[in-house]
Amino acid sequence: MQCKHYRRAALALALSLGMGCAYAQGLKISMYADITGLDPHDTSDNVSYSVQSGIFERLFQFDANMKLIPKLATSYTSNKNATEFVIHLRHGVTFQDGTPFNAAAVKANLDRLADQSLGLKRNSLFKLVKSVSVVSDDTVKVDLSQSFGAFINTLAHPSAVMWSPAVLKKYSTEAQLRKHPVGTGPFKFVQWQPGKDVELTKNNHYWQKGWPKVDSVTFYPAPEDSTRVAALKSGQVNAIYPLPADLVNTVKNDTKLAVQRDPSIYMYYMAINTQHKPLAKLKVRQAINYAINRRLWLKVGFADMGIPAESAIAPRVQFFAKQSSPDYSYNPAKAKELLKEAGYGHGLKLNLWVSNATTAVRCAQFFKQQLGQVGIQVKVVPMDSGTRDAKLWSVRDPKKAQFDLYYGGWSPSTGDADWALRPLFATESWVPTAYNVSYFSNKKVDQAITDGLATADPKVRAKAYARAQKLIWKNAPIAFLGTPDNLVGKQKDLTGVSMLADGTLLFDQAQFK
């Protein structure tokens, strides 16, 4: 293959990768960031989950349409009030170190996830697990301390993987485990060179016969958008994750390349700090929602690829319920009217916190323009992720939260309405406990969310979450924005590489046609 270097950035990346012009049997992927670790139980970012998914597998997972499917499990049953779950396991699976996958292995992993004393990043997801019992070699029973109808969906979360119990027994610290990740997945870990690459190799004893189709997968962090695209165009990598929306045409116009576009469940929003006097008024919050043209926001930030919000959660999240009242269609006149009724007809000054990523700042400037048209003067405050996290998520006294508006997003990786709503809107989830940075509190919403967990009956759960969504939509603790599509840039002859709706990368069935 003859390589043409479109940018110096691509040449620099190629040199750092130590690569020539021709690619071997392996798959090479450029990602927007480096991983943070190799223990999914102690991970909270999609880049890490994506890489880890080649090594580890879960009992349940989602297909491309966010339908829950069994993976290392084959089926389950539960009692009526969702406090007891019996899970049946797949036969003939072994870990990459030869350890058998069985009920004892599942118990070892669930016990670790449930152990709150370990301080793992995802322990909180499993705090309701009271006990795990081995019923037989291929059956495990999980008892919960209270009803939790979303438990099976939680077992499909990217963190809920099965480690080899032999490895968990041998290595007790994160420093040790990060060098020895061993699961049941299609690829085995080779090495991680922080800031440079993560290398996986084919698991020749993978339980799904015929897979994987590629001999290796190597991931390269490249935070600069143009660097990733240039590397793809010049043949240095086979795919980039994600493809920035504003560079889609650059890929589309290259006959050797293709855009993989899939719906997501990532809900973008602008949190409204209800602790601040003007924003405590419902009419002001509703005015903010009427002041923003969501379709135009998608054009500004995401090349018009996505859908405007029609609820507090995305349509592909389980138990989504479309909302129409109030109708938050773009209506500046209505926004001005509501501000006047709330006592702010003369105007309002607010600050908007946002990350310093290019697209995020561009969207923030758009919000400033939109809100300015209805009399709300906005000061945009960009900041790096470390500063933002310290100022936003570490506040212990809500009265000391300094922001008025915060632009961000949320992907419920369990695919369930519980994890889409509870962390952002339940009173129990106020920062720093979880992510309710609006400091929203409504007893009826809390009760509806609780009711949704009190049973495993999908009909009862659906009704509860419909109530919750209706109340949240009316009370507008956030500006509901929308759900952009997931985009991956790739070589045209590469299949099986795409993004799941939750924002993680799929590559286990990658092959060159």
Image: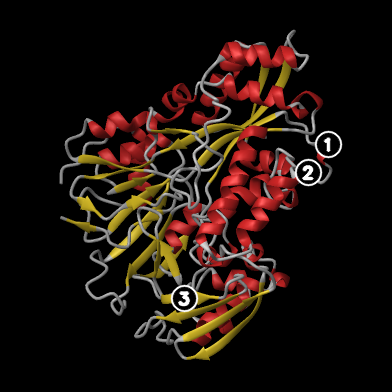
Give the amino acid type for the residue marked by disc 1 in the picture.
Lys
Q: Give coordinates of residue 251: x percent, y percent.
A: 27, 34
As measured in the structure, the alpha-carbon distance from the residue carrying label 2 to the one carrying label 3 is 40 Å
As measured in the structure, the alpha-carbon distance from the residue carrying label 2 to the one carrying label 1 is 7 Å
Left or right of residue 17, residue 293 in this image: right
What residue is pinned by disc 1? 400
Give the amino acid type for the residue marked by disc 3 in the picture.
Tyr
Q: Nearer the viewer, residue 474 or 290?
A: 474
* Position of 373 relative to 311 (above/below): above
Q: How is the image coloured?
A: secondary structure
What residue is pinned by disc 2? 395
Query: Are discs 2 and 1 less than 8 Å apart at CB?
Result: yes
In terms of sequence position, does the residue under pointer 1 or pointer 3 come before the other? 3
Q: Give coordinates of residue 301: x percent, y percent.
A: 46, 28
Q: Nearer the viewer, residue 396 or 279?
A: 279
Residue under the image location 74 percent in, 14 percent down = 341
Residue under the image location 69 percent in, 73 percent down = 145
Mark 1: give few (<14), some (14-19) or many (20+) Cα within 10 Å. few
Left or right of residue 397, residue 39 in this image: left
Could you tell me if residue 271 is visible in this image?
no
What residue is pinned by disc 3? 76
Left or right of residue 217, residue 165 in this image: right
* Position of 473 relative to 120 (above/below): above
